[in-house]
Image: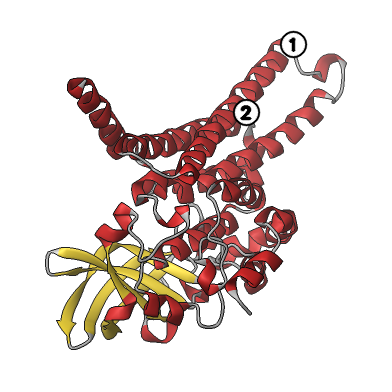
């Protein structure tokens, strides 16, 4: 079957997001306890097309837009932040794998575009040149959903330059090391390679991915500089988690305000406090969503300039700050009920903070990049 035919037959991500969210919500407590997603949730996300979202059409994927990813990931995050994290990252890794040489791409997607590719993005390994390829070794912690993976894209130093290398599941070991505060269900364990041979066809420079220079790239999604959109992959699950926290909080407070009258009734002062808390928190969530939607829209338009790269990085980091503030506001005003172990609100709160700590969402680098572009433009003008 041709790539075009496969792409046309696939429904949009949004079509299956609600169904997956329902399943993921039922499995969320188990995912927390087991520190990994259940196989049926993993399969559902793949079957819905998240892994194939940015895969080139030539390999059966969609080569689709960033905007189409925003709402489906957020919907998953309202039910289970870890599921949304997985769905968002597996889509992002499919895009990164499109920068490999054509022969390597064909190998990764030989069985179809739904291969579950995981990523180790920090250059924590070493690659030694050998005939026809590289010998790669290293230890990479925090590789999300690695236990379910088909392939991994790892970053290693080849001399003084970081390269990415695609390795199949049978080539790497996994160490059970994931015992975090939040995002427990992501199963972000440690990946280990020991002198594994990787052919040249499964290697590319980090600089190519950073610049958006894919081999023979035709779709706009394969020409976008990495820093312009990297934060989206991590901020979109936060958007869903914050929306989920707001939904839980609202249901609790609505029931409380509709409760008994008389001596045990909520005072008018407390009612105003709850109303203002809800209005401000949902305003922060809405503002964050607008920022992320703009990042996606700018990337989808193509021709992203240096200034827009910086603004995209800044906007994702700023959105993460807004979502953290909103979730903090809701959690702090929910009372002791929110702190119980089985409370979904405390899970959302932990997940938002865990996601916000990711290096891709730190405000400083994006702010420096964007402000530098503005100042340079002002000087040039």
At x 55%, y 56%, the residue is 64
Q: Residue beneath label 1, please?
A: 268
Using the rendered view, name the quadrant where residue 373 is placed: top left
Q: Quadrant of the N terminus?
A: bottom right
- Mark 2 = which residue? 282
Residue 377's place in the image compared with 92, above or below, is above
Question: Residue placed at 56% from the left, 41% from the top?
Answer: 239
**Residue 138 percent across, percent down from the top left:** 25, 74
Between disc 1 and disc 2, whose residue precedes?
A: 1
Q: CA distance from mark 1 to mark 2?
A: 21 Å
The extreme right residue here reads 261
Q: Position of residue 23 (x, y in %)?
A: 72, 61
Quarter holding the C terminus?
top left
Asked if residue 158 lies left or right of residue 120, the reply is: left
Closest to the observer, 283 or 211: 211
Picture quadrant where residue 247 is located: top right
- Rendering quarter of residue 363: top left
Q: Residue at x 46, y 54 (%)?
A: 221
Which secondary structure, mark 2?
helix
Q: Residue at x 46, y 38 (%)?
A: 320
**Residue found farthest to the top:** 268
């Amino acid at each position: 079957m041709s790539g075009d035919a496969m792409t046309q037959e696939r429904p949009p991500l949004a079509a299956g997001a609600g169904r997956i969210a329902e399943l993921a919500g039922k499995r969320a407590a188990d995912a927390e306890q087991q520190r990994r997603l259940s196989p049926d949730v993993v399969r559902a996300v793949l079957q819905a097309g998240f892994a194939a979202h940015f895969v080139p059409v030539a390999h059966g994927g969609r080569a689709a837009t960033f905007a189409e990813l925003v709402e489906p990931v957020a919907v998953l995050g309202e039910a289970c932040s870890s599921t949304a994290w997985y769905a968002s990252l597996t889509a992002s890794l499919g895009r990164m794998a499109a920068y490999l040489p054509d022969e390597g791409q064909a190998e990764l997607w030989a069985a179809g575009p739904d291969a579950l590719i995981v990523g180790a993005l920090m250059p924590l390994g070493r690659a030694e040149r050998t005939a026809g390829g590289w010998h790669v070794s290293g230890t990479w912690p925090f590789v999300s959903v690695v236990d379910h993976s088909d392939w991994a894209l790892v970053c290693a130093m080849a001399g003084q330059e970081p390269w990415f290398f695609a390795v199949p599941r049978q080539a790497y070991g996994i160490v059970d090391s994931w015992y975090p505060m939040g995002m427990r269900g992501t199963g972000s364990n440690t990946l280990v390679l020991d002198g594994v041979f990787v052919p040249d066809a499964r290697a590319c420079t980090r600089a190519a991915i950073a610049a958006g220079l894919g081999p023979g790239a035709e779709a706009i999604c394969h020409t976008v500089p990495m820093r312009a959109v990297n934060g989206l992959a991590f901020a979109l699950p936060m958007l869903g988690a914050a929306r989920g926290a707001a939904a839980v909080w609202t249901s609790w407070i609505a029931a409380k305000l509709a409760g008994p009258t008389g001596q045990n009734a909520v005072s008018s002062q407390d009612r105003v406090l709850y109303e203002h808390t809800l209005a401000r928190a949902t305003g922060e969530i809405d503002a964050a969503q607008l920022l992320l939607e703009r990042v996606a829209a700018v990337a989808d338009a193509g021709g992203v300039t240096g200034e827009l790269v910086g603004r995209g990085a800044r906007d994702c980091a700023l959105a993460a700050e807004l979502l953290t503030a909103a979730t903090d506001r809701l959690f702090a005003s929910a009372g002791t009920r929110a702190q119980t172990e089985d409370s979904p609100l405390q899970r959302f709160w932990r997940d938002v903070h865990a996601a916000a700590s990711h290096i891709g969402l730190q405000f400083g680098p994006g702010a420096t990049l964007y402000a530098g572009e503005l100042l340079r433009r002002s000087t040039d003008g």
